[in-house]
Amino acid sequence: MTSLNIWEEFIEEKKDGNKKDQLATFDTDFPYRVNPLAQQYRKKKEHNVHIKSSETKNICPKCFKTIYCPQKEHEVNHMIEIIPFVYLGTAENTYYIEELMSFKISSIVNCAYEIKYMFYDAPISFNHFKWDDREDFDILQDLDQVADIINETIDDSIEKKSNVLVHCQFGISRSVSAIIAYLIKYQGKTYKEALDMIKLKKESVNPNNGFKQQLEQYYEICSERNENKEEELTCFHF
């Protein structure tokens, strides 16, 4: 079963049950229930682009948004695949169910306290870490959990042939820190190696200094754990 099939089954189930929500009023045939905040955002966004209605417009084949600029210029706003099955994005990427469907997103990890989940009954698993992008904010206590969740969703995504989206407000600090935590714990990367790896895909990423220090500390914690495991295995063999 592919992620698209999951979406297709969801849509057919809604249509068969005649459960299309009245809030889903945008130009779409997808029957989902949308958070009113997302509805307000999209209406405002659509109002702003309608001002440009006299200009040439196209529909993006990847996210299905109406665009008034060259496709390549618009695509900088898309979520970006950092490693197989893991995408880095912004809050805006979560406001359009069509974009989530196009990128086969079956799981979302939200790292921003101020961003709410936008779709109540879409076939997407959702995890929310209420992080604030302040240097004095403690993310260290959550790094094991967020790394484990990303790893579990990758395993699930491989089975479903779908993807996980990790996002915050702008995809620069908080969500990047979450992906770095995964790369440290499960791929053995140092903070710098993980950051450089992500920068190859998105140059503007920049966790704040407080997050950087905590991630470097997390690397030391993970390294010590791995050393202890190796010692235990050595003792076991003897």
Image (tube, grey):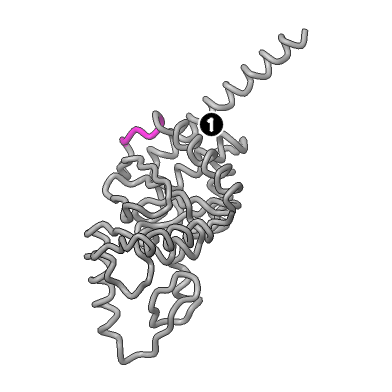
Helix, strand or loop for disc 1: helix
Q: For the N terminus, which image quadrant?
A: bottom right
From what the image shows, is residue 138 above or below residue 79?
A: above
The range drawn in magenta is 136-140
At a point 53% along the width and 59% down the height, the residue shown is: 5
Residue 228, how many percent across, how many down?
A: 62, 17
Judging by the rendered image, the residue that carries numbered circle 1 is: 219
From what the image shows, is residue 235 above or below residue 19?
A: above
Tally the numbered discs: 1
Q: For the C terminus, which image quadrant?
A: top right
Is residue 5 shown left or right of residue 233?
left
Q: Is residue 137 magenta?
A: yes
At a point 56% along the width and 36% down the height, the residue shown is: 184
Residue 102, how many percent across, how many down?
A: 49, 65
Q: Nearer the viewer, residue 39 or 201?
A: 39
Q: Nearer the viewer, residue 161 or 195?
A: 161
Q: Nearer the viewer, residue 209 or 231?
A: 231
- Secondary structure mainly formed by the magenta segment: loop
At a point 59% along the width and 43% down the height, the residue shown is: 193
Outermost residue, bottom side: 54
Outermost residue, right side: 238
From what the image shows, is residue 120 above or below residue 228?
A: below
Is residue 23 shown left or right of residue 4?
left
| Location of residue 201 (image quadrant) | bottom right
Q: Amino acid at mark 1?
A: Tyr
At a point 50% along the width and 62% down the height, the residue shown is: 103
Q: Is residue 7 magenta?
A: no
Residue 15, how many percent across, how many down?
A: 37, 64
